[in-house]
Each structure stands twice: as structure tokens, then as C-alpha cells.
Amino acid sequence: VDYALKRLGVEAEISADPAVIRSADKVIFPGVGEAETTMEHLKATGLDKLIKDLKQPVLGICLGMQLMCKHSEEGNADCLGIFDAEVKRFVPKRHEDKVPHMGWNTVTADPSSPLFKNLINDPYFYYVHSYHATVGKDTIATTDYINQYSAALHKDNFYAVQFHPEKSGK
């Protein structure tokens, strides 16, 4: 994510320091790893409460999005609960269904959302994940792979995407 921001001319500060995070004008909450272990770390450091209390725009990416949901099947983890969605493991229905879901897929998005404002209809984004957020009231974009799931969520100042925008091109 940092390299993608640099390509855009944005200098980001990577930090777990609560004071730095609170004073940032925008926060990106990326994630690679496993839900239960990451939630344990967030709780141990107090970052779980800090993230939920942020007032500036926050963007969760991949695991960051999943951790912003209520609960994850990955490790049976209670998450931050910002979004009213559950995180479920993909269950293949056919032989060609592969988990993890890796590769490009289309996104059907709410064009009025600031996240998708200047994109073509049904843009392609890059995914790498075995778990997905259910579709619900906070869903602003969906993708179909094995089943329909939330590709993006929005509530108040919190946004999140399952795909990797930093690997998806312009």
C-alpha cells in the first residue's frame, strides 16, 4: 500500500502509535494475516478501541475490512463491529471453485460512493482471500465468486474494500 501511495505522490507514515494515528487526516487500515491473531494484537495494544473511535476517514483493505466487521469465522474471532456484517469462509460448490480466491474480478458498485465515483461501470479489481464479508446494509459494492459478497462497505467515516486497490492499477 505504501508503494502505491508513493506512485501517487502521497507520503504516508506507517505507525501503530495511537497519537500518530489520532492526528492523521486519513487512516488506511490494511491487513495481511489471520483474523484471530490480529484481533488479539489489536486488543492487547488498545488499537481496537482507537480504530472504532476515529473521526477522520478510515479505509480498511482486505483483512482490515474483515476486522471492521462483527465476527469472523477465521479463528472464531469477535472483530471491531464497525460494519454489520459477518465474515465467512468460501465454501467451494464446484470443482473449479478455488480457495483462496486469487485474481481479477468485477465489482458492481454504487456509483454515488466516493470510492467508485470516477470509475468505469463494473471495474475489475485484484483479490487474494479465503474469507468474505456478507452482504448487508453497509454494502456499497458486491462481487460474485462462489457466491455474492461485499466487495466494499461504508458507514459514517469508515470505508473498506476486500480487493487490493494497491494491486489493481489506476
Image: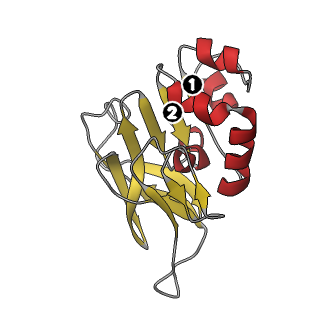
Left or right: 1 as drawn, with respect to 146: right
Dot 1: few (<14), some (14–19), or many (≥20) neighbours within 10 Å? many
Residue 163 is situated, as x and y percent measured from the top left of the image, at: 51, 49
Amino acid under disc 2: Leu
Whether residue 25 is situated above or below residue 63 in the rendered picture: above
Quarter-of-image position of residue 64: top right
Q: Quadrant of the N terminus?
A: top right
Q: Residue furthest bottom?
A: 95
**Residue under circle 1?**
27
- In the displayed structure, 75 sits above or below 112; it is below
Q: Is residue 14 visible?
A: yes
Q: Are marks 1 and 2 in contact (CB under 8 Å)?
A: yes
Residue 137, relative to residue 13: is it above or below?
below
Q: Secondary structure at mark 2?
A: strand
Which residue is at a point 59% across and 38% down the rendered structure image? 166
Q: Work out whether residue 111 or residue 87 is closer to the camera in this orientation and state it.
A: 87
The residue positioned 58% from the left and 22% from the top of the image is 8
| Disc with the residue nearer the chain's start (1 vs 2) | 1
Q: Is residue 34 visible?
A: no
Residue in front for this viewpoint, 25 or 52: 52
Q: Which residue is mark 2?
A: 59
Q: Image check: 137 left or right of 18? A: left
Residue 95 vs 137, above or below: the answer is: below
Give the CA separation, mark 1 to mark 2: 6 Å
